[in-house]
Amino acid sequence: MGKTLAEKIWAEHVVSSTAGEPDLLYIDLHLIHEVTSPQAFDGLRLANRKVRRADLTIATEDHNVPTLNIDKPIADPVSKLQVDTLRKNCEEFGVRIHSLGDVEQGIVHVVGPQLGITQPGMTIVCGDSHTSTHGAFGALAFGIGTSEVEHVLATQTLPLIRPKTMAINVEGTLKPGVTSKDIILAVIAKIGTGGGQGYILEYRGSAIRALSMEARMTICNMSIEAGARAGLIAPDQTTFDYVKDKPHAPSGTDWDAALAYWQTLVTDSDAKFDKEINLNADELAPFVTWGTNPGQGLPLSASVPNPADITNAEDRGAAERALEYMDLKPGTPLKSIKVDTVFLGSCTNGRIEDLRSAAAVIKGKKIADSLRLLVVPGSARVRLQAESEGLDKVFLDAGAEWRSAGCSMCLGMNPDQLKPGERAASTSNRNFEGRQGKGGRTHLVSPLVAAATALKGTLASPADL
Amino acid sequence: MEKFNKHTGTAVPLRRSNVDTDQIIPAVYLKRITKNGFEDGLFAAWRNDPAFELNQPQYKTATILVAGPDFGTGSSREHAVWALQNYGFKVVLSSRFADIFRGNSQKAGLLTVILAQEEIEKIWKEIEAKPETSVTVNLESKTVTYGSTTLDFVIDDYTRWRLMEGLDDIGLTFTKIDQVSNFEEKRASFKPKTLPIR
């Protein structure tokens, strides 16, 4: 019997396999940021260990950094200490770092792909659950905790039990105005936040093949929101073209060898997935979440559900609690919900294509008076690219704020936070209670819906304008 | 890591599903660079509510958290595990844990035990009626015991052994480091490197 893509990549990286033990897996790339690494470096120092492969490790500052006045010292002393600690650790252990102000600084999952160090067939880890983003290249990429960060720093390996595999088949053609964000929100609504637990997801089908690399990253990024540690897409010409001219792409004969290998990275026709899910792209519409977990989503044309109609007691309880937190009444049309803040950014939707698509909706118009629009590019390079295309002007002229790169309001670890009771339409990945600021309320949306909502003041798609 | 053989204590019910890592500890509390001091951030949004289970006097000394399904979804922050440990929890019981959270707990020595949801419901009822109920979680026999009830749970033998011996994963991997070196010699030359900077 043939192998799935995930099984192939796994098998290629097994250093040691013993019955009754996890496989020891080699890690090709380790991405690091300031929040989940300090205790790992401390662990190395305590045990007098070194970083085994600094040449397979790279750090950037993203979670905690301000997006305003980045030329000044970080105002919050606790944040500053954490960022300074990363800088010191990288210097001590010889790890490459892109600090605030550096042209390569940005969200770790935007930086890897743009440098070309994210390539097909690799194993990639980072102390961040959205590492699944890199799966868009046909890499096995997943988030790890700090103990595992220390393990990878010390040994460049991880002991892991191989997950099962699940195919997410998306056939058909997306309608105009429907994006990869809507695909993944629909997937999560279908299988639930625990549906992917214990699985590696492989997104397949004509609708997936038709997507750009950046749109694929959005899908893989949110695999974790369906409970799956990793999600991937087989590499194809779209992937190869994207990687080709990046700074760390293979060149010369290495390129030929790499390409020959990458072309083997497909699920064999006779391979069997442990589970399969089917979705029809023709039927998808812009999606928005109404609750406090990413599985609580519906098409934008729907109304807030009535918990009483939910038969599963667990889901009903969760819905009741969510509506109370979100201050929403059953039956309210989603399009009538008024929004205070629109956040365009994050490792889910902070890439140049995301900014372009939102700018195309906003160009020449003004955002609603009652609302603020925060545009936070995913990396310094994305910001520069956007500025070279005049997108910053489009956003600023519309009344938006144009910020520097970082995770920003996605998790509200820096000063970019919602106030208690404030409601946001956000292109990020999590609508958890308090995620974007204590008491803040989040509706997850695509960049197109974010842009239309910013103009209208209520949840809207470009078709509603 | 401390050895874990068995633990006896009282338990607190957390009747909520999908308690994600942002609920367990919000991002603003993740700025510390140590593994301790995170107890203040534990369930921060709910801690000011006197009705919140952890604030009820009968559960103040509980060391076992009996959580709803899909506990620990979301971010990979191991701080969520540290916050629970710093607060004093030794064990979390749930019918479903998120993968990364469970992995982190097993690295850091917080025992996460999976029981059927109907058993969780029975334990909730028991500890709500009698908060002083003593609960024993025995890793050696793979059982949870309270009152006259004993429940078996499943955990893979390797993780169980590692937790019972208090073994550090990194130390175990170093016993295979020659195999890692051999693997590295055979890696394809086209695989990217972060250094030198291009």
Image (spheres, coloured by chain):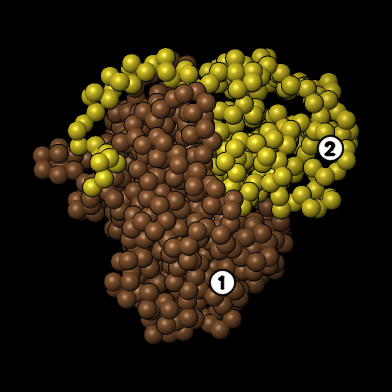
According to the picture, the residue beneath numbered tag 1 turns out to be: A341
**Residue A208 placed where, x, y %?**
33, 54
Q: Nearer the viewer, residue A105 or A152?
A: A105
* Residue at mark 1: chain: A
Give the chain ID for the brown colour. A
According to the picture, the residue beneath numbered tag 2 turns out to be: B59
Q: Residues within 10 Å of mark 2 (few under 14, many from 20)?
A: many
Above or below B56: residue B104: above
In the rendered view, does A423 fall on the left or right side of A220? Answer: right
How far is the residue under mark 1 from the one under mark 2? 39 Å
Q: Amino acid at mark 2?
A: Tyr
**Residue A439 placed where, x, y %?**
68, 61
Give the chain ID for the yellow colour. B
**Residue positioned 50% across, 23% down in the render:** A47
**Residue positioned 39% across, 30% down in the render:** A51
Residue A283 appears in view: no
